[in-house]
Every structure is written in structure tokens, then in C-alpha cells.
Image (cartoon, coloured by chain):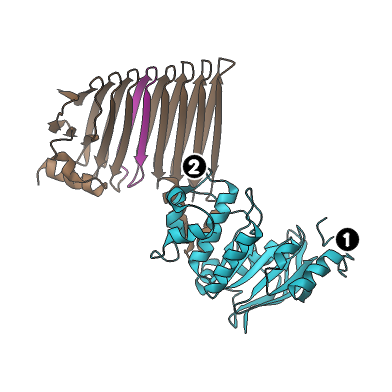
Amino acid sequence: MRLLEIKNLSFQLGGNIILDDLNLTVDQGEIHALIGTNGSGKSSVAYLILGCEKYVPTSGEIVFEGNSINALKLFERARLGITLCWQEPARLEGIAVEDYLRLGDPSIDSAAYLRKVGLPPEQYLQRNIDKTLSGGQRKRIELASVLALKPKLAILDEPDSGIDLLSIGEISDVIQSCKGNGASVLLITHREEMVRIADRASQLCGGKIVLTASPAEVAQFYKSRRCTVCNGKECHDD
Amino acid sequence: MTELEEVSRIVSNMGVDSAVLTDPRVAHVVATGLDLVSRRVIPGVDIRNEKTADGLVAQITVKQHAKIANPIHLCIGVLHDTGRQRIQLQVKSENDSAAKIVAHCFFPRAQNVEHIMDASIEIDSGAELHHAEGHYHGPFGGVTVLPTAKVRVHPHGRYTSDFSLTSGRVGKLRIDYSVTVEAHAIAELTAKIFGHATDEIKIREAVVLSGEQARSLIRTRVALEGRARAEVTGITEGNAEGARGHVDCMEIVRDHAFAQAIPIVRVTHPLAKVTHEAAIGSIDQKQLETLMAHGLTPEQAVEMVVTGLLR
């Protein structure tokens, strides 16, 4: 059953075509990897699904649980159960990690969620999400907050990037926790080894989905440079 | 209701357990308008006061080697809608003492009130003094607050101040602090202010790092909305080997408010180092979207960011 359906989505920013007639689906309970090189439009897909400012489709439709969400505001989409783990999490001065984790549900065991991302709660719960935390630490906290929200759709934008990298094993554990809570995951990455965590995968190039298939097939395709959009010139990181 | 009872109620509203004013282990001074309402001294802390034509002189001495467990509370303000109050505060922390002064300044009905605070603070060698000052202003914006302080931190001493005016209208605020930091001593000045409507805020904090290995931090956080205006000048001067200072100013501006930050750093010794950072602007969109992605409305997200900045 479809949870998310992106139909013929096009998006321009500053006169540049970022996404061009993109079609993508994420099923209930599915981990769907979206792979593409830097600048291929992966994060734009995430921001359009979430409804970030300046990210308004030029054309096309985003359907969540059978209903178009194009007209909904960001927080309304969040309340439907869509959330995003940002590639570069924001600094939030004066906001404690514990308060942040409890935004969606004040009754959660916030310490347990920190442990799931490898952060000792006694060292982190009362710290503020400010410049005293490294980018990698903020990334882990962001992942913990996504877990704590128990979303229906968790969009993880390059969860493996950051100053102190999370291992694929750690990310896999987080994703499985999301799935265990009943969430679907849209896993955005530019690393083919990450794709293998998924149930299904799509490759993005030049603002288009060039292949949707099994993770093994997409990883192979990504490596093989057989993309017909760019003839293999752009859609692989050397 | 007596004035002391009303002060107790106001202090409670400021988040402080008003029992501190009846606790025999806690030193305090309560003054409203031109009157001294209550005072308590405890072992290790000497408090003297003298009434003047327009207010009060208060001398607080923390005795040598005394480690004062409970904060010394100063409850000072004007309960009426008009008035003028001048407080001359002289604080001396003697050698190797440690104490915390918590000042609660209240102007709940101010429509035409002027509050002047002239402070002289001396932190002797090895002593530590933390001075927190929280303001409770009413909704009218009719108060002018003029705090000035001259502070000297002797070798190996430590002085921290934390000024907070985040509830009610600011009115007009002119802070002028000058701090001299001697060898191996530390000074940290923090100010957090939320300006609304036509509030006017002017802050000048100057630190001179005169001794070797002296350290300082000036940290200012201002949020403005409506047509409020703020000018923040943070000055740090490094004049000795190993002196390190930093000026950090962040201002969030909404509506038609106006903010200006002027960090001034001077170094007269080649082995001193002073740095600064200043950021002024509207609330960062990514911060808002991060919070909205957790289900907060735009209004809730703005409130959380502003509250966090001023926390």
C-alpha cells in the first residue's frame, strides 16, 4: 500500500530546473533509498515533501496516505506524520536536548532515544543544541528526535554525513528502529553501500528518477554509469 | 497588604521561593521607593545601609574566606506608578570568599519611574562573586533603568554577572558596566533582554584585561519586536601577556525593530588575544523549520527560538 506518492513533480529554483517530472513512491513500512550525486536534487525532494519555505512545486502532486498535501503547511504535514532528519541540523541556542526530544511527546523516555544513537544521556540530555556540540553530535541528536517522534514517514537526508561519521551499522540500527515503530523511511544518500540497507531504491539524476528497482540492481546501475540522462557522466561519485 | 508582602508576591512571580525573605540563613535587603523595608545579615556577610534623599546606599561585604552557601537577595524596586529611586551599591568580596548576589528589580506599575543603580564592586584576590540581576517590569513601558557598575577583579578572582530583562516592557534601559580584570582573574558578563513596542535599549560593557592570563567573556542576547531599538557595544581590551577576551553578541529582530551591535576589541600586548562575533537578523528559517517539522506552529516555533536565545 502506498504511503507517499510523488506524481510528475517539477521544481525550479532561481530559474534552474531542479526536478523534472519526477515520480517516486514509498510504500507502508518500506525503506526506500534515493541515491544520487551531490547536486542531483535529492535534498530538494526532501524539502518539497516536507513543505519548506521556497520549496513549492512548479507542477505535480505530492500525495500522502491518499491525499494531496501540496496545499498543507510544513507543520501540518509534520502533524500528519512526516518528518525530516536534516543533512545539517540547525543549532538551537538555549534549547536543551531533553526538551527537543520531547517536542512531539513530553512523556517519552528521552534517555532511551539518546542511547539508541550512541550518546550517553547523562552527558547530553541537559546540554543545549548550540555551537558547543559538534555537527556529528547534533546529527545523532537529530536522529534520536526523529525516532522519538514516531513518524509515519521519516526522511533521512544523508544520515551518514557529518563530522564524526555514523557507521552504516549504526544507521541501519536507527532505520530498523524507525521501521519497528511502524515508520516508512526515505533514505537519501550518495553512497551505494547505504542503498543496501533499503527494501527498494531509486536513482536520481538530472532531476529525474532514472531507475527504481531492488537495492542491488540500483547499486549496480549507479556504479555502472549506464544512466541514460547523463550518459554516465554525472551520476556517480568517483 | 504590606509592602513586604507585595514584594514577596512579586518575587514569587519571578520564579523565586519567597520563603528566602523569611529564612534566617539567607541575607537580604528589601527596598521599595525611598524606603528600606527589610534587611537581614548572616555570619560572613555584613550589610550596612543608609537612606539618602533619593534612595539608598547599601554596602555589602563578604568577609575574608567566607563561603556563603545561600544567595544574598536584593529586592529593589518601585511599587507605585511614578517615582525615582537611586541605589548606590557597594560590594566588596574579601580575599578567598565566595558568594552569590541575586537582585530582583521590580517596577510592576511603572508609568513614569526612574531607577538608577550605581554599583561599585571589588573582588579581592581569590574571591568569587556571582551577581545575577533579574527585572520584572509591568506592561506600560514607563520605566527608565540606568544601571552603571565599576568592577575590579583582583588577581585570581572571579566575577560573573547575569542581567536578565525578559518579561514585561523594558521601557528605557541604559547599561554601562566597566570591568578591570587583573592577573589570572576571570570576568564573565551576560545580558539577556527582550524589547517590545517602543522600548529603547542601550548597552555598553567594557572589559580591560590588565593582568597576565586574565580572561573575559561578554555575552549579549537581545530579541526585539515591534519598534524596539537596541544598541549593544561590547568593548574588550587586552593589555597583558596571555590575556584572552571574547565578545559575543546575538540579536534577533522582528517587525520594525532596529538593532545595532558595535564590538570593539583592542590589544596593546603582542601576546594578548581578543576576539568577537556578532550576529543580527531575523530568526533563522532553518531553526523554525526544524521545530515545525516536530509539529510546532510557526508562532510556537518563534516563541521557542526567542525563549531559547534569552534563556
**Foreground of the two, A125 or B30:** A125
Which one of the lettered chains is coloured cyan? A
State the predominant SS element of the stretch in magenta.
strand
The magenta stretch is B141-170
Q: Is residue A89 magenta?
A: no
> What is the x, y in percent for residue B55?
19, 27
**Residue on which the image places disc 1:** A233
Amino acid tagged 1: Lys
Q: Is residue A57 above or below residue B249?
A: below
Residue A18 sits in quarter:
bottom right
Q: Quadrant of residue B206?
A: top left
Element type at marker 2? strand
Q: Can residue A158 be spotted in the picture?
A: no
Q: In the shown orientation, is residue B265 left or right of residue B179?
A: right
Question: Where in the figure is residue A187, as x and y percent of width and height?
Answer: 66, 67
Question: Could you say where residue A130 lies in the image, as x and y percent from the top left?
Answer: 51, 46
**Horizontal relation, residue A57 to residue B112: left or right:** right
In the picture of the structure, the residue carrying the numbered disc 2 is B251
Residue B145 vs A92, above or below: the answer is above
> In the picture, which chain is brown?
B
Element under label 1?
Answer: loop
For the residues bearing labels 2 and 1, Cβ distance under 8 angstroms: no
Q: Answer few, some or many: residues within 10 Å of disc 1's Cα (few below 14, many 20 plus, some between 14 and 19).
A: few
Q: Is residue A3 visible?
A: yes
Q: Residue at x 27, y 32 (%)?
A: B101
Q: Which quarter shows the N terminus of chain A?
A: bottom right
Given the current orientation, which residue lies at the most extreme right position?
A231
Q: Residue reaching furthest front?
A: A169
Chain on which label 2 sits: B
